[in-house]
Amino acid sequence: MDTPTLAEIQAAAQFLAARSELRPKVGLVLGSGLGSLAEQIQGGTDLPAAEIPGWPVSTVEGHAGRVRVGRLEGQAVIAQQGRVHYYEGYSMPRIGFPIRVMQLLGVEILILTNAAGAVNPDYQPGELMLLRDHLNLLGMAGQSPLRGPNLDAFGPRFPDMSQAYDSGLLGLARQAAEEVGLKLHEGVYVGLAGPSFETPAELRFLRMIGVDAVGMSTVPEVTVARHGGTRVLGISGISNKANLDGVTPTSHEEVLAAGQVIGPRLMTLIQGVLRKL
């Protein structure tokens, strides 16, 4: 299994630190079709992920594969413009590598975004959902980003996940949404392996166990972040309607198209949160 060592993580952090004078306290991970949000980050440094030692490179359309360090709403931030997924062939620990690097750089708050399919039938494409909690079905089945030797420099062997999503950051997001009249759901996200979209029977099962939105990312990054004590805010952009009856097919093109609607709303919310930090 590909398990990054502390030395690898340090090398990547040193590489980034040498290319920017900014020391970001906020990290952003931008999901499918949402990478254009990074264009709002002012100044700083823009690096292809392939140039950063050990950094996994996305192979999926809608994920640019760049890292940008700069300022957004006065906050020094580092943005991962496109992420990698388990279905691309990366190990879970490697998926968590960018979060480890951000932690060594001094990031204290991580804002994770994703494009997610609705499981809750009340959700509509283009709407946003705050992650109140998640179901880590991959991790529960053994595919954890913490598998392997524990990195004691970051956190304990058995990290607590009872408060995966920071209550203070959730409060700021609610306030920011209310101030601009932005509709905001709150619910449970489930992380699956993909890359196939879910069958109607799978969606009905997920709904039965309390899931509101489904995706193929985010949960491994949250696990790594919380292991290292990083506060997390998770936001899903609802990209497609729940297909519980099997009538409407789902496609990646639909997900990317929804990103054009979700992007401005998501940026409004993130900017509002950053202003309140």
Image: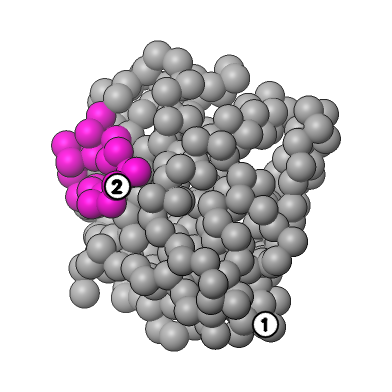
Mark 1 vs mark 2: in front = 2
Q: Residue at x 48, y 58 (%)?
A: 218
Q: Is residue 17 above or below residue 104?
A: above
Amino acid at the residue labelled 2: Glu
Q: The C terminus is located in which quarter?
A: top right
Q: Which mark is residue 158?
A: none
Q: Residue at x 21, y 74 (%)?
A: 1
Is residue 217 one of those drawn in magenta? no
Where in the figure is residue 205, as x and y percent of width and height?
60, 84
Between the residue at mark 1 and the residue at mark 2, the CA separation in whole angstroms equals: 31 Å
Left or right: where does residue 222 sit relative to residue 96?
A: right
Amino acid at the residue labelled 1: Ile
In the image, which residues are magenta?
47-66
Q: Is residue 202 above or below residue 33?
A: below
Where in the figure is residue 246, as x and y percent of width and height?
53, 76
Prevailing secondary structure of the magenta residues = loop
Query: Which residue is nearer to you in this view: 273 or 160?
Result: 273
Left or right: where does residue 1 sit relative to residue 243?
A: left
Q: Secondary structure at mark 2?
A: loop
Left or right: where does residue 223 sit relative to residue 252?
A: right
- Residue behind mark 2: 61
- Residue behind mark 1: 209
